Image (cartoon, helix red, strand yellow):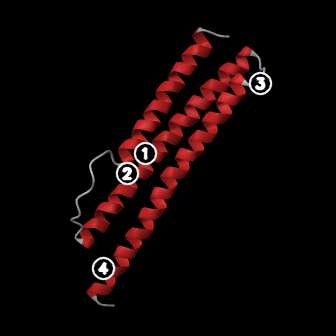
């Protein structure tokens, strides 16, 4: 195996890892949406005792915060592989202006977690 074959193999591996890490990050984001939906359904569509409502909100908040952190780590790993891919390709295209996917994901996760903190405050301080 000569040097160019090794470089091609490394490039292919970086492409596969990028796709894998990116899919993981967005899959985790979908998991967050499912957990959030389940938590909101449990709070507003079912009649459960106050203690169980509190537990549901706290558990949902913790799960979403943990999965958010893992999704951000996956996104970071994906962007590192993308840098290696662009470096190998000699990537020089100018990207259109606007926010990148990672920034949008970070914004969405931050907003979800902030709203969940407000939901915790609503359930604990202003119970219905």
Q: Residues within 10 Å of mark 3 (few under 14, many from 20)?
A: few
**Foreground tag (2 vs 3):** 3
- Say which label, 4 or 2, has the lower sequence index: 4
* Label 1 sits on residue: 72
- Pointer 1 and pointer 2: residues touching (CB < 8 Å)? yes
User: Do the numbered discs 2 and 3 sit on residues whose CB atoms are within 8 Å?
Assistant: no
31 up-or-down from 91: above or below: above
Quadrant of the image containing the N terminus: bottom left
| Circle 4 residues within 10 Å: few <14, some 14–19, many ≥20 | few
Residue, disc 4: 7
Residue 46 rendering spot, x and y as whole percentages: 77, 24
Q: What distance separates the C-alpha of mark 3 from that of mark 1?
A: 32 Å
Within 10 Å of disc 2 (Cα), the crowding (few <14, some 14-19, many 20+) is some
Estimate the spatial distance between the alpha carbons at disc 1 and disc 2, rounded to whole Å.
6 Å
Quarter of image, res 3: bottom left
Which circle marks residue 46 in the picture?
3
Asked if residue 46 lies left or right of residue 32, the reply is: right
Query: Which residue in the protein does label 2 denote?
Result: 76
Q: Which residue is located at x 60 percent, y 9 percent?
A: 126
Alpha carbons under labels 4 and 3: distance apart? 57 Å
Quick one: label 2 or label 3, which is nearer the N terminus? 3
Mark closer to the observer (4, 3): 3
Q: Earlier in the sequence, mark 3 or mark 1?
A: 3
Quadrant of the frame with the C terminus: top right
Q: Give the distance between the C-alpha atoms of the residues marked 2 and 3, in whole angstroms.
A: 38 Å
Cα distance in 3D space between marks 4 and 2: 23 Å
User: In terms of depth relative to the viewer, which is nearer, 52 or 99?
Assistant: 99
Q: Secondary structure at mark 4?
A: helix
Q: CA distance from mark 4 to mark 1?
A: 28 Å
């Amino acid at each position: 195996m000569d040097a160019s074959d090794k470089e091609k193999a490394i490039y292919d591996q970086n492409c596969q890892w990028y796709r894998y890490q990116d899919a993981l990050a967005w899959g985790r984001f979908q998991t967050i949406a499912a957990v959030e939906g389940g938590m909101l359904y449990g709070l507003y569509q079912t009649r459960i005792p106050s203690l169980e409502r509190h537990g549901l909100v706290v558990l949902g908040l913790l799960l979403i915060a943990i999965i958010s952190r893992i999704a951000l780590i996956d996104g970071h790993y994906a962007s590192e592989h993308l840098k290696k891919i662009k470096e190998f390709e000699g990537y020089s295209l100018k990207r259109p202006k606007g926010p990148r996917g990672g920034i949008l994901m970070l914004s969405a996760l931050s907003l979800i977690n902030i709203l969940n903190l407000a939901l915790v405050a609503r359930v604990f301080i202003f119970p219905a």
